[in-house]
Every structure is written in structure tokens, then in C-alpha cells.
Amino acid sequence: MAQDLSEKELLRMEVEQLKREVTTPRAPISRTGKEIKEYVEAQAERDPLLRGVPEDRNPFKEKGGCLLS
């Protein structure tokens, strides 16, 4: 898509994007990092990657075995 646009159109798109970015509210990482850490710690008890999935609710559990004779 970008290959089909002229240089003027590409520059116009870049300026529009920069205008959007300049109006985006910013927050210091010292605050947002702390908020993210608190959120992750609060959700850790329900996180299946940390706690695992119970066997009865595991959609990837093998349903049956394979016998070779």
C-alpha cells in the first residue's frame, strides 16, 4: 500500500500521525510501571500461565491414547 502512494501523500500521512501522537496524554514511567506491576500481581492468582490449567478444563488434554500392536 505504501509503495503506491506518492512522497507527498506519505509525508502528509506522517504529519497526521505525528499530530495525533502529540495530543496523546503521557504519564511518567515511574507511575505507570508501578500501576502495571500492581495489576499483574493482583491478576496472578487467575493467570493460567502461572498457575496452570485444571485437567478437567484443559482443552488441549489428550482425549484418548493410541495403541500400537
Image (cartoon, grey):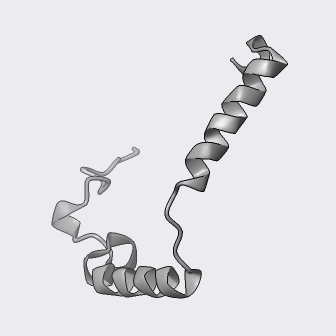
Q: Quadrant of residue 47?
A: bottom left
Q: Is residue 6 above or below residue 42?
A: above
Quick one: which residue is furthest to the right in this view? 7
Q: Where is residue 65 in the image (x, y as percent from the top left)?
A: 30, 51
The reply, left or right, for residue 5 in relation to residue 48 is: right
In percent of the image, x 32 and y 53: which residue is there? Answer: 60
Q: Which residue appears at 26% of the width and 53% of the height?
A: 59
Q: Which of 13 and 48 is in front in this view?
A: 13
Quadrant for residue 40, please give it: bottom left
Q: Which residue is located at x 22 percent, y 71 percent? A: 54
Q: How many marks?
A: 0
Above or below, 12 relative to 69 = above
Q: Residue at x 77, y 29 (%)?
A: 11
The quarter of the rendered structure image containing the C terminus is top left
Q: Residue furthest top?
A: 4
Q: Quadrant of residue 14?
A: top right
**24 relative to 4 in the view: left or right:** left
Q: In this view, does 29 lie to the left or right of 7?
A: left
Q: In this view, does 60 lie to the left or right of 8?
A: left
Residue 66 image offset from top left, x and y in percent: 35, 47
- Tell me: residue 55, above or below residue 34: above
Picture quarter with the N terminus: top right
Foreground: 1 or 47?
Answer: 1
Question: Viewer-proximal residue, 13 or 67?
Answer: 13
Find the residue positioned furthest to the left.
56
- In percent of width and height, residue 7 lies at 83, 20
Image position of 37 with respect to 18: above or below: below
